[in-house]
């Protein structure tokens, strides 16, 4: 088995959590990050892979065609203690180049390899504490600028940088702030210096209301899709971390007190799966009072119509804007009926809503698969 087989699909935030553990143990490692892509590639800028000194790998930067090469280069980076930028041309017309023999995705990929040390702790601590942070790193420029790094704190609206740094990152603030808010990572050029802006946002929350066996696949897939998953149960001993080990948190409360138990903001997505009509009705009423952009409700159309009739009898009505956030029956129409197929349709719908996408076949999408962001700035 390849060392990447077990941890190949690890989300970026988990890769950085592993990096934090490595640094805290005093071990050595290299962080490889995709910093620029020309043409097509499996991963976009910001994708990460951690290589420990013993060769253990976590995460991935391609579909598998460059990981072994990066592991080989990681040993050189550890030996030199210096960051290194490598460019791989995966275009099929690259004559006699092993990277141009159809093994890639018809693109050119720049990968930055950095030795992990205490200097990277600000970003590792921010990610570990669930705080947003922007990392700006010089990837190409004169002299010894390559590897120069600063951290952008959105709360302080400024950079944390060494006093003796030879480069001023201040002009980048107007670029970093919107990229971080959007969760997008890109390379920008300022005065012939290439700088990678790496946006680290705390994971969005996925709250699963219900403790039946059918929520387990939703929790697992939601976690793998880089959500922080919390399970909420009612009236019972089933809401325990032992029962749901893949969840980041497990809470027990009552339907009417769910808003007192958790913060439901615009970065929170909720799946209601109690299979109890009364509980569902109370929870839906509570959640529609919040700013959550997605409330997925298990059950058929008829059940929801009955719920609306009950609300109307009580004198409660909901605006079209409120009902637009309510998805029932929950999930995309994928046609599957097994627990994991159902969970896949639910998590896929949530990802589409989070990314403001109208789900359809990629073959029907015009242009690139991933949205491209072209940062602009005025350096005058």
Image (cartoon, rainbow, N blue to C red):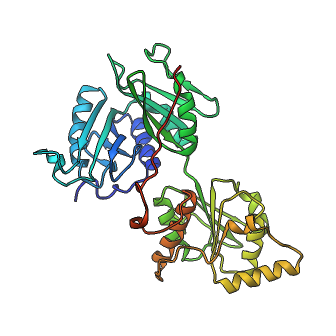
Residue visible at 57% across and 63% down? 241
How far from the left and from the top, in percent, is residue 37?
Answer: 34, 43
In the displayed structure, 175 sits above or below 130; it is above
Q: Nearer the viewer, residue 355 or 358?
A: 358
Q: Nearer the viewer, residue 370 or 329?
A: 370
Q: Residue furthest front?
A: 366
Residue 151 seen anywhere in this rendered image of the structure: yes
Residue visible at 31% across and 39% down? 111
In the displayed structure, 217 sits above or below 93; it is below
Residue 130 seen anywhere in this rendered image of the structure: no
How far from the left and from the top, in percent, is residue 280?
Answer: 72, 75
In the displayed structure, 132 sits above or below 267; it is above
How far from the left and from the top, in percent, is residue 95?
Answer: 12, 45
Toward which corner of the image does residue 182 lie, by quadrant?
top right
Toward which corner of the image does residue 64 lie, by quadrant?
bottom left
- Left or right: 68 as drawn, with respect to 141: left
Residue visible at 32% across and 47% down? 39
């Amino acid at each position: 088995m390849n060392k990447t087989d077990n941890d190949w699909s690890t989300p970026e935030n988990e890769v950085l959590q592993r990096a934090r553990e490595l640094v805290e143990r005093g071990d050595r490692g290299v962080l490889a990050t995709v910093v620029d892509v020309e043409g097509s590639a499996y991963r976009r800028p910001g994708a990460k892979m951690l290589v420990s000194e013993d060769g253990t790998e976590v995460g991935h930067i391609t579909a598998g065609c460059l990981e072994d090469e990066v592991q080989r280069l990681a040993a050189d980076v550890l030996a030199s203690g210096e960051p290194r930028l490598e460019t791989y041309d995966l275009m099929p017309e690259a004559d006699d180049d092993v990277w141009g023999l159809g093994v890639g995705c018809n693109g050119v990929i720049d990968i930055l390899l950095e030795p992990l040390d205490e200097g990277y702790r600000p970003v590792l601590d921010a990610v570990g504490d669930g705080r947003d942070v922007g990392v700006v790193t010089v990837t190409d420029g004169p002299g010894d600028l390559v590897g120069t790094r600063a951290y952008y704190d959105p709360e302080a609206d400024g950079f944390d940088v060494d006093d003796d740094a030879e480069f001023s990152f201040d002009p980048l603030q107007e670029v970093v702030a919107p990229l971080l808010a959007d969760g997008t990572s890109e390379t920008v050029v300022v005065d012939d210096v290439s700088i990678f802006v790496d946006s680290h946002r705390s994971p969005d929350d996925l709250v699963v209301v219900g403790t039946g066996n059918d929520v387990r696949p939703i929790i697992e897939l939601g976690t793998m899709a880089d959500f922080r998953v919390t399970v909420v149960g009612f009236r019972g001993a089933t809401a325990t971390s032992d029962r749901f080990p893949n969840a980041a948190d497990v809470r027990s409360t009552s339907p009417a007190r769910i808003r007192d138990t958790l913060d439901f903001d615009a970065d929170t997505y909720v799946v209601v799966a109690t299979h109890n009509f009364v509980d569902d009705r109370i929870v839906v009423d509570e959640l529609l009072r919040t700013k959550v952009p997605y409330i997925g409700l298990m059950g058929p159309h008829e059940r929801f119509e009955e719920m609306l009739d009950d609300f109307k009898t009580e004198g409660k009505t909901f605006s079209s804007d409120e009902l637009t956030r309510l998805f029932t029956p929950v999930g995309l129409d994928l046609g599957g009926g097994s627990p994991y197929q159902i969970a896949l349709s639910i998590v896929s719908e949530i990802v589409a809503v989070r990314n403001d996408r109208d789900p359809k076949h990629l073959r029907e999408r015009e242009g690139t698969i991933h949205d491209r962001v072209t940062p602009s700035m005025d350096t005058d």
